[in-house]
């Protein structure tokens, strides 16, 4: 998080801006010093998306404990997985009641929202939908909690090994989190530098990496500048009544777009017995980067 990007964010605040959302992408904690100061200075709510970062820390404090509330996905291969579902962490009672009304209705809302609270009126119906995690999925994630620390230590060791192997490889920048950050390493995001690889397109690079057998090396899909998703600029066909706008201008979200277009992510494993996979993936990246000239011919 550079001060330039925060200056840019400050310029974009309008009367309708409500919150700053810190998304701890790929398990690397955001700079929470900078974001807490920024949101306080501009009187904005600080929220966190810890979906990639269960157990990650910033200055020893777990992500998800900085904002007024934090959302955590538990789907797919997340550092803590339930197969599907997620949870919200908050120590704000008012917000907790609202989360309850989204996730539950009737009994739990009636039990937990005080009868004299304004929102108790809605306890029976909640928000009209029941968006709660399946109890068995919640139990799966809960059972993994005691092992999360070990999983994360395993991921840290594997990520360190992969970063070491990739250091100095032409056209590939490895992430360098600050020493006071404790990443969860949901993935190892590499910055692809075509300017150092004779202009090789990232898609061609990935194709060659796949051909080397590293089939789970991937480009981020949905994880992009939010404003570029049609849901946010052209929602009309899906949500009648919502106005369509022009899609963001070509010179908007330049940093987010550049990061999205130049990220190659690798899986990170947590068990010793998977070290050979980590080594095979880094070997594939090194081989393709070193032979990039053959691919641009
Ligand atoms: C950063 C981030 N936030 C939120 C989500 C949404 O999670 P879910 O699919 O559990 O709703 C995802 C999806 O993987 C994600 O990557």
Image (cartoon, rainbow, N blue to C red):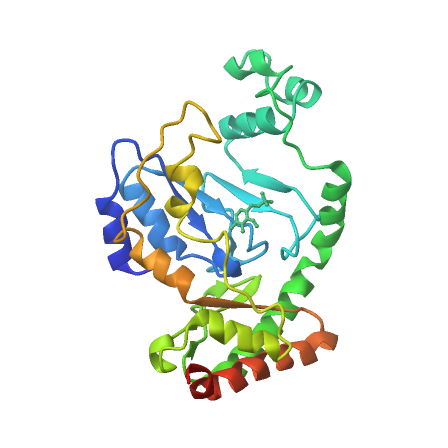
Q: Residue at x 54, y 73 (%)?
A: 207
User: Relative to 77, does residue 92 appear above or below in the rendering?
Assistant: above
Q: Does residue 254 appear anywhere in the picture?
A: yes
In-image side of 100 versus 163 (left or right): right
Q: What is the quadrant of the C terminus in the image? A: bottom left
Closer to the camera in the image, 127 or 198: 198
Choose top left, top right, bottom left or bottom right for residue 172. Answer: bottom left
Q: Residue at x 72, y 55 (%)?
A: 146
Question: Percent position (x, y) of residue 268?
Answer: 61, 68
User: Relative to 102, does residue 199 appear above or below in the rendering?
Assistant: below
Q: How many marks?
A: 0
Q: Outermost residue, front direction?
A: 297
Closer to the camera in the image, 244 or 36: 244
User: Relative to 243, does residue 246 appear above or below in the rendering?
Assistant: below
In-image side of 110 versus 202 (left or right): right
Question: Percent position (x, y) of residue 243?
Answer: 36, 28
Q: Does residue 160 appear anywhere in the picture?
A: no
Choose top left, top right, bottom left or bottom right for residue 272. Answer: bottom right
Q: Residue at x 38, y 75 (%)?
A: 193
Q: What is the quadrant of the N terminus in the image? A: bottom left
In-image side of 93 versus 173 (left or right): right
Question: Percent position (x, y) of residue 40?
Answer: 31, 42
Question: Percent position (x, y) of residue 199?
Answer: 36, 77
């Amino acid at each position: 998080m550079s001060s330039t990007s925060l200056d840019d964010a400050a310029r974009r605040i309008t009367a309708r801006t409500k919150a700053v959302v810190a998304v701890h992408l790929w398990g690397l904690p955001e700079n929470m010093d900078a974001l807490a100061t920024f949101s306080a200075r501009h009187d904005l709510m600080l929220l966190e998306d810890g979906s990639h970062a269960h157990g990650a820390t910033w200055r020893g404090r777990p992500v998800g404990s900085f904002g007024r509330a934090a959302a955590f996905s538990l789907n797919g291969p997340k550092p803590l997985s339930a197969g599907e579902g997620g949870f919200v962490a908050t120590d704000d009672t008012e917000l907790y009641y609202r989360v309850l009304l989204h996730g539950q209705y009737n009994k739990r809302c009636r039990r937990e929202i005080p009868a004299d609270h304004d929102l108790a009126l809605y306890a029976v119906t909640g928000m009209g939908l029941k968006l709660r995690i399946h109890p068995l999925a919640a139990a799966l994630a809960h059972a993994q909690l005691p092992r999360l620390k070990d999983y994360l230590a395993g991921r840290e060791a594997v990520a360190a090994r992969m970063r070491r192997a990739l250091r100095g490889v032409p056209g590939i920048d490895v992430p360098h989190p600050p020493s006071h950050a404790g990443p969860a390493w949901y993935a190892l995001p590499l910055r692809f530098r075509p300017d150092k690889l004779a202009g090789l397109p990232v898609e061609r690079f990935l194709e060659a990496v796949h051909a080397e057998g590293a089939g789970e090396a991937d480009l981020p899909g949905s994880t992009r500048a939010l404003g570029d998703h049609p849901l946010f600029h052209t929602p009309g066909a899906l949500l009648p009544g919502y106005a369509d706008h022009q899609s963001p201008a070509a010179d908007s979200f330049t940093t987010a777009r550049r990061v999205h277009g130049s990220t190659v992510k690798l899986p990170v494993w947590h068990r010793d017995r998977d070290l050979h996979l980590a080594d095979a993936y880094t070997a594939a990246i090194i081989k393709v980067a070193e032979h990039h000239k053959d691919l641009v011919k």
